[in-house]
Image (spheres, helix red, strand yellow):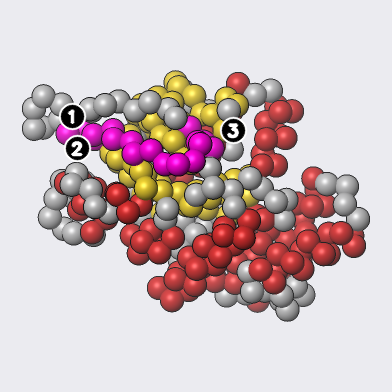
């Protein structure tokens, strides 16, 4: 596991990292993904500021934090769409920034990604959207592809929707379709970029239950980027709280929800009083 800074508090109360304890509570699983002292800057915006984070194998991990604190930037580093300015990102023991293009292309087959809007192709039927990665990246026959696509569609509750076009689907159905497409290559790691965005509370709850059910059947490392605390309470097994480009605290979900760190306690309870303000 990537070592975290033992104490990132400053010597005076105005230190912006006063509440960043850097505390990492270990799980019983090896790490699938590690961020090692990662810095990333866009212009004058220093988004990741020495990020140390480990995401365990065979768990549903959530990266939580206020909007604009670098959560989605983490996903882009994991899949090699962004490289760190400093530091390293390690997936299953391999340094992503160090991989040649051909090896990075192969590594990306390990990943399934569910984007905020499902990212479906508007000109393709739902069936063809879900079949697309198999046709693009494998030599499977259409018969084999049909077996896989139909199984994944049934798994997410879309078994009779294959002929529909994306514009005929509700927001919740598009999310489930994106989830099915993320699963067809049997990925070792599934990344969810704010999957609850745009969904009402009931459909968010149903999507959370679906994530839990599919993970229980397939295993692997699931990483969910969100700022929705109810979603975290429903599905998270491991939580990393990200603020100002560093980990405030991380570990098993039940321990994070019992944390005495003022920032973690405020954020996970959704309270107005605490170190997190409107800035």
- Report the mark closest to the observer, 2 or 3: 3
- The answer to whether residue 246 is visible is yes
Q: Is the residue under label 3 in contact with that under label 1 (CB below 8 Å)?
A: no
Residue 166 visible? The answer is no
Please state the horizontal and vertical placement of residue 108, each as a whole percent of the image. Answer: 67, 39
Local packing at callout 1 (Cα closer than 10 Å; few below 14, some 14-19, many 20+) is: some
Position of residue 115 measured from the top left corner of the image (x, y, whole percent): 56, 54
Provide the secondary structure element on which disc 2 rests. loop
Label 3 belongs to which residue? Answer: 92
Q: Position of residue 172 (x, y in %)?
A: 54, 71
Outermost residue on the front side: it is: 28
Confirm whether the magenta stretch covers residue 23.
Answer: yes
Identify the disc placed on residue 9: 1
The foreground one among 168 and 273 is 273
Q: Residues within 10 Å of mark 2 (few under 14, many from 20)?
A: many
How far apart, in angstroms, are the residues tagged by discs 2 and 3?
Answer: 30 Å
Residue at position x 8%, y 27% from top? 12
Residue sitting at 23 percent across and 59 percent down?
Answer: 269
Q: Main secondary structure of the magenta part?
A: loop
Give the alpha-carbon distance from disc 1 to disc 3, as whole Å.
Answer: 31 Å
Boundaries of the magenta span: 17-34
Do the CB atoms of the residues marked 2 and 1 lie less than 8 Å apart? yes
Q: What number is the disc on residue 259?
A: none
The answer to whether residue 178 is above or below residue 99 is below
Mark 1 or mark 3, earlier in chain: 1
Q: Dot 2 corresponds to which residue?
A: 19
At mark 1, the secondary structure is loop
Drawn side of residue 266 relative to residue 178, left or right: left
Q: How far apart are the alpha carbons under marks 2 and 1?
A: 6 Å
Q: Earlier in the sequence, mark 2 or mark 1?
A: 1
Quadrant for residue 91, please give it: top right
């Amino acid at each position: 596991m990537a070592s975290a800074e033992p104490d990132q508090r400053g010597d005076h109360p105005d230190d912006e990292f006063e509440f960043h304890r850097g505390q990492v509570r270990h799980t019983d699983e090896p790490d699938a993904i590690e961020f090692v002292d990662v810095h990333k800057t866009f212009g004058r915006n220093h988004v990741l500021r020495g990020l140390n984070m480990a995401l365990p194998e065979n768990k549903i991990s959530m990266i939580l934090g206020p909007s604009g604190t670098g959560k989605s930037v983490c996903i882009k580093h994991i899949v090699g769409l962004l490289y760190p300015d400093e530091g390293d990102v390690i997936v299953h023991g391999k340094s992503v920034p160090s991989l040649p293009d051909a090896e990075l292309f192969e590594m990306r087959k390990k990943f399934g990604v569910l984007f905020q809007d499902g990212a479906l192709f508007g000109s393709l039927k739902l069936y063809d959207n879900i079949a697309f990665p198999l046709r693009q990246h494998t030599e499977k026959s259409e018969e084999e592809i049909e077996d896989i696509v139909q199984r994944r569609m049934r798994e997410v509750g879309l078994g009779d929707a294959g002929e529909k076009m994306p514009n005929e689907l509700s927001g919740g159905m598009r999310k489930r379709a994106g989830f099915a497409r993320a699963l067809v290559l049997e990925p070792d790691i599934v990344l969810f970029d704010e999957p609850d965005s745009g969904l009402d509370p009931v459909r968010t709850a149903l999507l959370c239950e679906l994530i839990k059910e599919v993970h229980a059947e397939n295993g692997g490392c699931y990483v969910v980027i969100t700022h929705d605390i109810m979603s975290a309470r429903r599905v998270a097994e491991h939580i990393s709280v990200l603020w100002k480009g560093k980990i405030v605290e991380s570990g098993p979900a039940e321990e994070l929800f019992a944390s005495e760190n003022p920032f973690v306690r405020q954020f996970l309870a959704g309270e107005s009083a605490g170190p997190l303000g409107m800035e």
